[in-house]
Amino acid sequence: MSKESRAARKAANQASRDADAALHANQRREKAAGIREETPEYLRLNDAANEAAKKASWWRR
């Protein structure tokens, strides 16, 4: 495997972790505010996390 390939995989894995962290931070804020339904912001962050996960290596999630 080339250095570029490893670097791309590592970047995709980090992007997936970052998107997940943003989603969960938003969930904690919304829960603390008493919001229980799926908000547009939650849906946006969830979609972003799902797209990032598709690009990441499933071995590293």
Image (cartoon, rainbow, N blue to C red):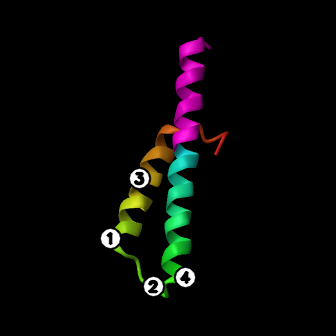
Structural crowding at the residue carrying mark 4, measured as other residues with C-alpha within 10 Å and reported as few (<14), some (14–19) or many (≥20): few
On the image, numbered disc 3 is attached to which residue? 48
Q: CA distance from mark 1 to mark 3?
A: 12 Å
Residue 32's tag is 4
Task: Name the spot of residue 37 as percent of width and height, x first.
Answer: 42, 83
Task: Name the spot of residue 9 as percent of width and height, x first.
Answer: 56, 29
Residue 22's tag is none
Residue type of the residue flagged with mark 1: Pro
**Element type where label 4 sits in the image:** helix
Q: Find residue 45 and report its image quarter.
A: bottom left
**Element type where label 2 sits in the image:** loop
In the image: residue 60, left or right of residue 39: right
Q: Is residue 9 magenta?
A: yes
Q: Is residue 59 or residue 13 the one in the foreground?
A: 13
Q: Nearer the viewer, mark 3 or mark 4?
A: 4
Question: Which of the two labelled residues, at mark 1 and mark 3, occupies the earlier sequence position?
Answer: 1
Q: Which residues are magenta?
A: 1-15
Q: Find residue 21 and report its image quarter.
A: bottom right
Query: Which residue appears farthest toward the top when viewing the image?
Result: 2
Q: CA distance from mark 2 to mark 1?
A: 12 Å
Structural crowding at the residue carrying mark 1, measured as other residues with C-alpha within 10 Å and reported as few (<14), some (14–19) or many (≥20): few
On the image, numbered disc 1 is attached to which residue? 40
